[in-house]
Image (spheres, rainbow, N blue to C red):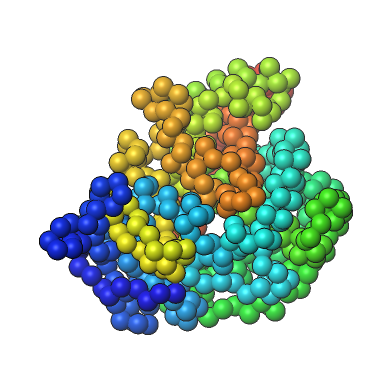
Amino acid sequence: MAPPRANSGDGNDGAVGGQSKLSPSGLPIREIPGGYGVPFLSPLRDRLDYYYFQGADEFFRSRVARHGGATVLRVNMPPGPFLAGDPRVVALLDARSFRVLLDDSMVDKADTLDGTFMPSLALFGGHRPLAFLDAADPRHAKIKRVVMSLAAARMHHVAPAFRAAFAAMFDAVDAGLVAGGSVEFNKLNMRYMLDFTCAALFGGAPPSKAMGDAAVTKAVKWLIFQLHPLASKVVKPWPLEDLLLHTFRLPPFLVRREYDEITAYFAAAAAAVLDDAEKNHPGIPRDELLHNLVFVAIFNAYGGFKIFLPHIVKWLARAGPELHAKLASEVRAAAPAAGGEITISAVEKEMPLVKSVVWEALRMNPPVEFQYGRARRDMVVESHDAAYEVRKGEMLFGYQPLATRDEKVFDRAGEFVPDRFVSGAGGAARPLLEHVVWSNGPETGTPSEGNKQCPGKDMVVAVGRLMVAEMFRRYDTFAADVEELPLEPVVSFTSLTRAAAPAAAGEGAARRGV
């Protein structure tokens, strides 16, 4: 990596012979403001600010304010010492500059999934999963081709598998409310969405049957060993957490037995996929593909649902009965046309508000908050107001919640606006979808073998829509308490009002806590 430029001030326009340098689109080229401070000490202080003293949003907003509103900055990103050899990044904190990270011709994404540190390959059977491969790597196209084929072939299993998981999950919620008190959604979501993910992708016996009730514990433990440097506010007191989670790598051998059991389950559950790949997609060793399927199912899909669905419920809870009534009306009007069951096609054609709510949740709380990539060459990165020179090899970082809440792109950018993506609603229009970039690409884009956009993009969106539709087919309204935490909100239902409409006939009505 080329050494970064020395710390600079707030950025006088670069000039040659007294003339301002301009970017190709006519913006003034400025020095990137910010800096990295004193080695070791400054990255450590920045880590504490990011996790404990300020929080991620304030960490970036305070630095933007410090440098006169500049949204391209030099900062240190956690975890820093001793887990990351080089914490220095160029942060892209607006919608325009962030788009550089979605251009595979400009950034190399090899080993950048988790940012400035790379988990041990021992956690993946010694193989480098698809998500850690750059789009230019020949193995990327081969593995992604299989994953995309799997996602496409199994899409028609998503709705029935989700319907079964939703029914079981909310039967448990109803029972808990009848027993008294509130019911935490997150714990039930963790349990039932693992079974759903595997049923939707592979069919056969779900993990809870094949591995027992500890299946979720094993999967989550494996995720923790990968992501602990990025976790916060899960251990008290915080100095102990910082020492345990952010300073040293948890040794992979402590999760080897769990991972071996997970891999054995997938070897059986995904046998048909592995057989087909050996026949029709030669060039990928069966063992490497197996470990990739484990990663796709548990890290990408299950891990994403674990974070994303509580955010949807959070925003619905905060929106209240008025939005609930509109959603219930839309869902119940469309369900009879689908034979009384909600299908992905019915949502796509007949439920514009449901679709908008999910896109807005993805805009407000993308399941993965950051993107990283190394500059492939010297380049000029443009924000709305200025341009900045970045040198080949520098690490670029984008904090997605700021990019997707950019006030120069979205009206009322910091608010959850349920009908934002309903055509013609309040002046909003579908072109705004190109700025919804949770999937490592625009929502208007398409995953391909040659790009890094999530191969399961359509499945994730479909599951979010099914969640909203099934909820308001079954319930008229609900209330919940929300506790905001760094990774995901903890949502606890306090009341659910069962629908009296024909779609829920015979199910009765229950109210608790109202």
Q: Is residue 179 left or right of residue 125?
A: left
Residue in front for this viewpoint, 356 or 206: 356
Residue 14 appears in view: yes
Give the position of the N terminus as an image quadrant: bottom left
Q: Residue at x 70, y 79 (%)?
A: 253
Q: Residue at x 24, y 53 (%)?
A: 22
Residue 154 location, quadrant: top right
Q: Is residue 248 above or below residue 472?
A: below
Q: Is residue 428 above or below residue 36?
A: above
Residue in front for this viewpoint, 212 or 342: 342
Residue 171 appears in view: no
Q: Is residue 222 left or right of residue 434?
A: right
From the top left corner, tell me how far across and down residue 167 is, in percent.
Answer: 70, 37
Furthest toward the front, the residue is: 17
Residue in front for this viewpoint, 382 or 498: 382
Q: Is residue 278 left or right of residue 436?
A: right
From the top left corner, tell me how far across and down residue 198 is, in percent.
Answer: 75, 50
Please tell me how many numbered marks the rendered image carries: 0
Furthest toward the left, the residue is: 18
Q: Residue at x 25, y 49 (%)?
A: 27
From the top left corner, tell me how far across and down residue 21 is, in percent.
Answer: 22, 57
Q: Is residue 282 left or right of residue 451?
A: right
Residue 64 location, quadrant: bottom left
From the top left corner, tell me how far across and down residue 423 is, in percent.
Answer: 45, 24
Q: Residue at x 41, y 56 (%)?
A: 399
